[in-house]
Amino acid sequence: MNQVSRQELGHWLDTTLQAQRFKDYCPNGLQVEGKDRITHIIAGVTASEALVRAAIAKKADAILVHHGWFWKNEDPCIRGPKRIRLSLTLRHELNLWAYHLPLDAHPVLGNNAQLARVLGFEPDRDENGNPITCGSDGLVWLGRATRADTLGELGDEICNTLQRTPLIVGNAQQPVDRVAWCTGGAQSLIEAASAAGAQTYITGEASEQTFHWAQETGMGFIAAGHHATERYGVQALGAAVAAQFGIQVEFIDLNNPI
Ligand SMILES: [Zn+2]
């Protein structure tokens, strides 16, 4: 069975995702240190207790996620669900790697790139082939929806592909030519998407005011699910790890309706 050292894998992940480039709300990289040698990784969207328990049941050596732990402004005390997650992880010597914004933004493996792939969005690119983006940290991607002409058709495409009914604001008949998208809880970036000339904005979640902004600007808006839009980056990253080191990486999709 192939194996890789914690140090080598961590270095490859940090370098591939350019983890140091981002000012984030959580530490990116190795959040909890476990075993020295890694042969089997469990990948998932969020390092929940259920994912930790699944990794233990599968006798994995590491967990790789988009949503890790130790978020800015959270209570740093180790109590309740945090104690259980952390004590299980330490007791079983699991490594925990988490990449938040670096995994949203990566031009190939990232959540935005991968959501475009699964939904058939053709990203706008500059002369070097890099995606043309807007919003804070360049997190909102711009492009063209190739599988839908109207907002209603795009909603159907998203529903079928992501297997979750999206929340749609706008007229089903309105055209969707220029689209903007950002996975996860990026509803506040709708203004940046609108300023960049998009007619439709797709993200994971909605806020109360998102409805009014969309209605008053005539912009189509789709909240397709935070979890549902962020399943694909970590899978692409996991596949890249497996290809690079010949170790086993298994993605576990634990349903989350939000
Ligand atoms: Zn997220």
Image (cartoon, rainbow, N blue to C red):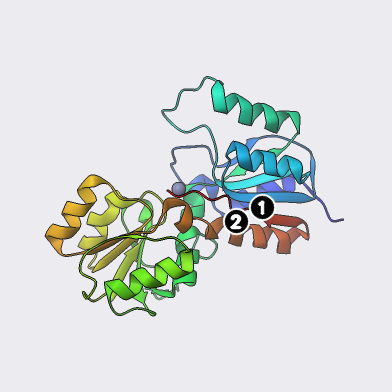
**Residue 186, position in %: x, y?**
35, 51
Task: Classify residue 1 as left or right of residue 199.
Answer: right
Badge 1, how many Cα within 10 Å: few under 14, some, many 20+? some
**Residue 172, position in %: x, y?**
24, 71
Task: Classify residue 167 as left or right of residue 101.
Answer: left
**Residue at 44% across, 27% down:** 74
The residue to which callout 2 is attached is 16
**Residue 111, position in %: x, y?**
48, 59
- Nearest the viewer among 67 and 223 is 223
For ligand 1, tell me if the residue under mark 1 lies within 8 Å.
no
Instruction: Residue type at mark 2: give it.
Output: Thr
**Residue 87, position in %: x, y?**
67, 26
The residue to which callout 1 is attached is 12
> Is residue 36 shown to the viewer in this render?
yes
Q: Is residue 254 placed above or below 179 in the rendered structure?
A: above
**Residue at 34% across, 78% down:** 148
Quarter holding residue 219: bottom left
